[in-house]
Structure formats: C-alpha cells, structure tokens
Amino acid sequence: MFAGGAALTLLVLGGQVRADAAAQTPEKALPLPGQVFQVEGRTAFVILPTPGQTNRPTPWVWYAPTLPGLPEARETWMFERFLAAGIAVAGVDIGESYGNLQGRALYSAFYQELVERRGFARKPCLLPRSRGGLMLYNWACEHPESVACIAGIYPVCNLRSFPGLDRAGGA
C-alpha cells in the first residue's frame, strides 16, 4: 500500500514491469453519487439521472471548474433538479487553466469521451461557476456548434478581474 491506501499492481510482460492502470482509480468527492474516471490523465465525473429517466443521447450540463472541492454540497439542490428532469451533470478537472490552449484541448478530449463513447448529447448546456467562465467560455468560442446554451454562477469573463494578468500569465 502507498500513502492514502492506494494499491499498485505491477505486471511483468516480456521482461518489462508496468503499473496496472486499473489499480489507479481516480477519486473525487461529489455532492451526489456519480461515476469518477479519467480522461487524458485528468479526473472527470458524471452524475447520471435514474436509468430510464433520460432520453438518448443523454442531455447534460457541463459544470466547471471541478477543482478540489468543486462541485460542492451547496449545489446539490440544483443538481437534483437537473437529474429529476433527466439531465446528467458532468465535468473534468483541468487545473488552473484560466481558459488556456492546453485546458481547452483537455476539454475537447472530455467532450469526445462523453459524446462519442458514453452516448451524451452533442450540445451540452455549459454551467461555469466563477473562473469556470474563463474555461468554458473560451472552449465555447472555439466550438459554438457544440453548445446548446450557456448559464453561469457568477462567471469570470475577464482575466484582469480574476485572477489578474500577472497570475494568469503563467497558465
């Protein structure tokens, strides 16, 4: 066992030792039960409506940011309303990207995972919270054909207001 109780399984194939990817299950605290998985090495999640309560393809709300602690318990009421309407909630932790090129590429990989492999609708509703605005709005500008609508929870739209140009410049 490693720190935090994580187990690592090693496989020996043709004289080479590799870590078993299945043993490295990502973890994320969610306000409601959901699935946690990885996309391009980043922790992602989906919270699904009750089976049979949604149409195919699955309509979804794309929540951002999903940094540690987000989404949080105060959003449970809102998420429950989405789920009751047959709408999934999903997100991926791309770190403090502030809408940069690398973060947008990770968002595209996440979008492809949900749409092409998991049967989600091609046009999600984007729901940025705070700095998630920088992340999702910049992705939406590059992919307007892939957006049904945009909502927001006090979304940041200007790097000068948050986090400030000096802090965002590194990203």
Image: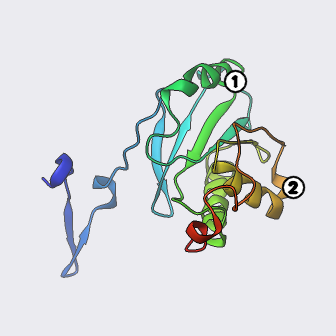
**What residue appears at the point 67 percent right and 62 percent down from the top-left corner?**
99
Q: Is residue 11 left or right of residue 80?
A: left
> What scheme was used to colour the molecule?
rainbow
Question: 52 above or below 155?
Answer: above
Answer left or right for 105 relative to 121: left
Q: Which residue occupies the foreground of this view, 95 or 125?
A: 95
In the picture of the structure, the residue carrying the numbered disc 2 is: 145
Say above or below: 58 vs 164. above
Q: Secondary structure at mark 1?
A: loop
| Distance Cα–Cα, label 1 vs label 2 | 22 Å
* Of 98 and 80, the residue lying toward us: 98
Q: Is residue 138 left or right of residue 16?
A: right
Neighbours of disc 2 within 10 Å: few (<14), some (14-19), many (20+) = few
Label 2 element class: helix
The x, y position of residue 124, in whole percent, is 75, 43
Question: Residue visible at 46% across and 27% down?
Answer: 33
Q: Which residue is mark 1?
A: 86
Residue 5 marker:
none
Residue type beneath disc 2:
Glu
- Label 1 or label 2, whichever comes before in sequence order: 1
Q: Quadrant of the C terminus?
A: bottom right
Q: Residues within 10 Å of mark 1 (few under 14, many from 20)?
A: many
